[in-house]
Image: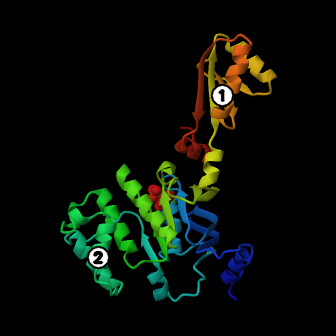
Amino acid sequence: MEDAEYFLSLKWSNHFVVPVISTSGLTKRYGQTDVVSHLDLDVQSGQIYSFIGLNGAGKTTTMRMLLGMIRPTSGYYKIFDGRYKNHEMWRKIGYMIESTYAYPDLTVREYLQVFYHYYQLVDRSMVGQMINRLQLERYANTKTRFLSLGNLQRLGIARALMHQPQLLILDEPVNGLDPAGIVEIRHLFQAMAAEGTTIFISSHLLSEVAKISDRLGIIHQGRLLKELSSEDLSKELKNKLIIDTNDNIGASQLLLLSGNEPQINHDGEIELTVKDSFEISSKIAGLLVQRGFELKKLLPWEEDLETFFLRIINVEK
Ligand code: ATP
């Protein structure tokens, strides 16, 4: 057994389900910099896994390594069980790395027909099906150089899906899509995942992919800082109560005595970090009013996703 196989089989022995993508210590160094550093990642079958990071975080480099476009400096990776020959592997994988490049003088239909032949498909309706599925009907006969960024993304996704792969690796697939487009793509990915397709996507906006994903991995400067499920995400968001009374110093003392940890913010208001701001707000209101404080403001506040993301990577908003 080769090193890589041995290493990954050890990792897998701790898992009930064999992951579709598995990496162990995966590293890519350019010059003196590890742009991807010791990445340990597992993406399970049928999962939608989103890789979130700022520009330059190492997302595309990771995807390029997984697709065999560049060689890792060190570490291992495995796609499926690693036993497929190259050509068999490509039948199982659909991908889109960075922006879609489409031959500018081909129409949308012609472009997809090129890939229909490339994949040696037999179902002649497939090109039409992809055009419908990605809502490109209006542009079927438009040359690709006239497509908007969002429609070019749709075309790239259509190309990646056409041979019905078991694994999709898509770099920034929702980039350039309008809000309605994001919802459509979300439904498309969810339907595909329900049929068993594994989807690994990258994004620099957590809010854009949080609702699509089963699992999220936050990467910063080449390191995977945090992995969490979409259910964990809402638990991790900070909740606060912002309180303003006629006497915030006195109210703070009362809150402190009753076991809270109030802080006075730069507007002179009280901030209380709590588990669930909606649940606790009526208790706090009752306590303050009972002790004679005049309540001017009681505002539940929940951290937004981008603030959470910046907090995890330790960048102030
Ligand atoms: P973006 O969202 O901007 O696409 P990313 O997370 O995909 O960012 P990468 O494209 O993986 O980031 O780049 C990670 C880092 O590696 C960047 O600092 C980039 O400049 C650097 N890098 C990528 N390719 C090379 C290369 N061939 N030579 C040197 N540095 C490179």
Residue 291 x %, y %: 74, 13
Colour setting? rainbow
Secondary structure beneath dot 2 equals helix
State the CA–CA distance, disc 1 to disc 2.
55 Å
Of marks 1 and 2, the one in the foreground: 1
Quick check: 187 left or right of 248?
A: left
Kind of residue sitting beneath label 1? Ser
Residue 156 x %, y %: 35, 67
Using the image, determine if residue 315 lies above or below residue 231.
Answer: above
Secondary structure beneath dot 1 equals helix
- Quarter location, residue 183: bottom left
At x 76%, y 17%, the residue is: 253
Kind of residue sitting beneath label 2? Val
At x 29%, y 68%, the residue is: 132
Mark 1 or mark 2, earlier in chain: 2
Using the image, determine if residue 170 lies above or below residue 304.
Answer: below
The front one of 135 and 167 is 135
At x 69%, y 34%, the residue is: 274
Disc number placed over residue 81 in the picture, else none: none
The front one of 272 and 180 is 180
Quick check: 114 left or right of 231?
A: left
Q: Quadrant of the N terminus?
A: bottom right
The local crowd at label 1, few if under 14, some if 14 to 19, many if 20 or more residues have their Cα within 10 Å, is some
The local crowd at label 2, few if under 14, some if 14 to 19, many if 20 or more residues have their Cα within 10 Å, is many
Residue 193 x %, y %: 50, 68
Judging by the rendered image, the residue that carries numbered circle 2 is 127
The front one of 217 and 298 is 298
Judging by the rendered image, the residue that carries numbered circle 1 is 281
Residue 184 x %, y %: 38, 58
* The CB of the residue at mark 2 lies under 8 Å from ligand 1: no
- Quarter location, residue 305: top right
Q: Is residue 169 visible?
A: yes
